[in-house]
Image (cartoon, rainbow, N blue to C red):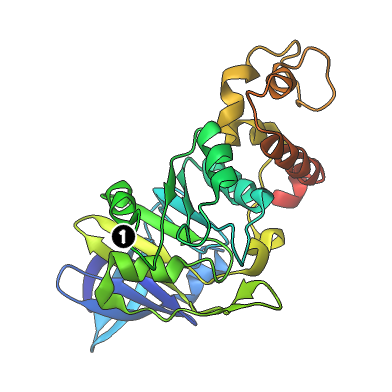
Amino acid sequence: MGEKATGRIIRSISGFYDVQLPDQVVTCRARGILRKEGSSPLTGDVVNISLEKGKGMVESILPRRNSFVRPAVANMDALVVFAANVNPITEPFLIDRVAAIAGDQGVEVYLCVNKCDLDPGAELVRIYSHAGFPVISTSAETGDGVERLRQLLKGKLTAFTGNSGVGKSSILNRLCPELTLPTGEVSEKLGRGRHTTRHVELFSLGQDTYVVDTPGFSSFDTDQMDVILKENLQYAFPDFGPFIGDCQFRDCSHRKEPGCAVRGALERGEIEKTRYDSYLRLYEKANQIKLWELK
């Protein structure tokens, strides 16, 4: 039957999975029955494997705390959304979209405003600090903010995400210089970077600390990302939290209803307009989802 072991998938490439065991890394294929059951392995999964004649096979996947489509990662503790106010400039809606998806699954969200040596991104820092997110200003060129980011990542499995060319791999190289990950220049014409990360890989930054650098995707490829039910969307906006219970109607959608405490907070400047606008856009998308389609 071969030797049995349990480990974590640290790399996924074209149907092959590198599994970290206490004393070695084993490249495995997955049993076909896993795909038939709709549970293909993801980077970050803890899996049971069998070993025979130096070859590994993923036999089963241990229960996940969470999982994501883009980035394709499981058991995530935190998500660092990279943004910049220089080419490629990041739209707030794209940040809000991915932050809501992570928040809906109970994942901590940090905003990393990179390239602060070129532009501090003061408006991004203001908006997301006001909304309650931890915000870190970094520069891969100067090293500013890198140690603060390292402290936030300790003891967590964290994914880096953001539009291509925003500097995810450059910052990861700063955090772990021995990685020497490839980085790409930003196209001035298109305003986006080349995809320098070709697969999903988990890197160790110390004891119980892992970072996943994911393939960059222009505009975050939002149409391919996970969905949030409209009933849950309000809870994925932590800045709405203090006001949700004060609405006149218990089933308030925070769009047009009278006595809406969320819109009242917006009018008083206690909720950022860009955040509320993002909520409306995401609500309209969620409103189109039919529960039977998710079965």
**Front residue of 268 and 180:** 268
Up/down of 8 relative to 238, above or below: below
**Spot occupied by residue 225 in the image (x, y as percentages of width and height):** 64, 58
- Residue 269 image point, x, y percent: 67, 24
User: Observer-nearest residue: 130 or 34?
Assistant: 130
x, y (%) of residue 234?
65, 31
Quadrant hosting residue 233:
top right
- Near-viewer residue (63 or 24): 24
Relative placement, left or right, of 25 versus 141 is: left
User: In terms of secondary structure, where does tag 1 sit?
Assistant: strand
Q: Which residue is mark 1?
A: 210
Is residue 197 at least partly visible in the picture? Answer: yes
Question: At 53% across and 66% down in the image, what residue appears?
Answer: 166
Q: Is residue 202 left or right of residue 82?
A: left
Residue type indicated by callout 1: Tyr
Q: Is residue 166 left or right of 75 when viewed as pictured?
A: right
